[in-house]
Amino acid sequence: MNLIELYIGEVTRRLPEKNREDIALELRSTIEDMLPEDYTLHDVKEVLAKLGNPAILASGYKERPMHLIGPRFYDLYIDLLKLILPIAVLVSLIAVVITSIFTADGGATITETITAIVGNAISASVNAAIQVFFWLTIVFAIIERADHSTSHTPLTSKYQEWTPDDLKETIHIPKEKRSPNIKLQEV
Amino acid sequence: MDNSLFNSLSTELRRGTLTLAVLSQLQTPQYGYSLVQLLESSGISMEQSTLYPLLRRLEKQELVTSSWDTTENRPRKYYVLSDYGTEIFGMLKEEWEKTSRELYILLKGAETNESD
């Protein structure tokens, strides 16, 4: 198959169905415009090199973002992750301890029981962390793609753009409490 | 000197002006490659992988309209400014002139400060 068709195929297979035909037609006529009258394989290669990597060309045509979670939602995503992750791990740990107590095998030694609980606790908390990370990431990736507003400014945790009033909501930690080890010398 | 940093900064500097450059050349209908040649003849080099998607985007934003010309030996897609596009182009042009005047004064000022 000839290189030009292969190149066009490489670009269009990355594009949404409805645009493919039109872009393919335009691309073909552009490539022919760039080629001299009686062109050789060498000429074709030169022209395709000028157009560059088909993946990059295709990404220019695409309207969807090329990142999973962009700057608009990243802060919110990280904040939620930090909030939910410890809670989920804690809840799963409590669940493991409670079920272990109620299903404890009378014949097992204390060491055996403790080892079992620790093992279960580790696997349950890793599991919970992975689940939270996975689902939160999926949800944000979908939001990123569903959000059609033209603004790119990051959102605050209230899902609104920042105003000076948000400063009132930040948790203020007094300086003395923040660093108890470092005492400023009184003058 | 770090050349890659300079390159990325200068690309960034030029990126915003590309739309204006393209709009300015679409007062008469142009097809993809004729536009490339027009821009190149004025010394503006633009990646073709940037230009073609840009034309589509401008069309989607209703700044330009397009039509297929199938009368010649190969079909060509022509782009031309819409009424809305002409209006926006006029505004952008004024904005650019204002910005470049301001920047000129700033840079001129920096030069005289240096020589002090």
Image (cartoon, helix red, strand yellow):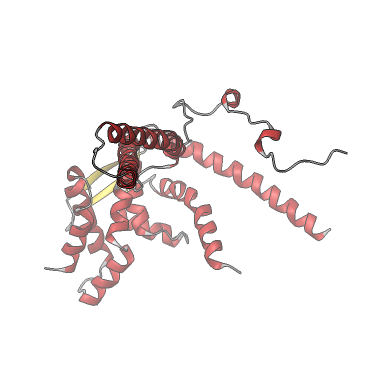
Q: Position of residue B76 (x, y in %)?
A: 23, 52
Residue furthest out toward the left: A1
How many badges with numbers are in the image?
A: 0
Residue located at (69% from left, 52% from top):
B107
Residue located at (24% from left, 62% from top):
A31
Residue located at (24% from left, 77% from top):
A42
Give the quarter of the figure containing the C terminus of chain A: top right
Residue A131 shows in the view: yes
Question: Where A31 falls versus A20 (above or below)?
Answer: below
Q: Position of residue A45 (x, y in %)?
A: 26, 72
Residue located at (39% from left, 35% from top):
A90
Figure quadrant of residue A131 = top left
Residue furthest out toward the right: A187
Residue A64 shows in the view: no
From the viewer's perspective, tell me whether residue A171 is left or right of residue B85. right
Closer-to-camera residue (A105/B66): A105
Give the quarter of the figure containing the N terminus of chain A: bottom left
From the viewer's perspective, tell me whether residue B88 is left or right of residue A163. left
Closer-to-camera residue (B1/A178): A178
Closer-to-camera residue (B63/A95): A95
Q: Position of residue B22 (x, y in %)?
A: 41, 49
Question: Where A95 falls versus B29 (above or below)?
Answer: above
Q: Position of residue B97 (x, y in %)?
A: 58, 44
Figure quadrant of residue A71 = top left
Question: Where A18 falls versus B110 (above or below)?
Answer: above
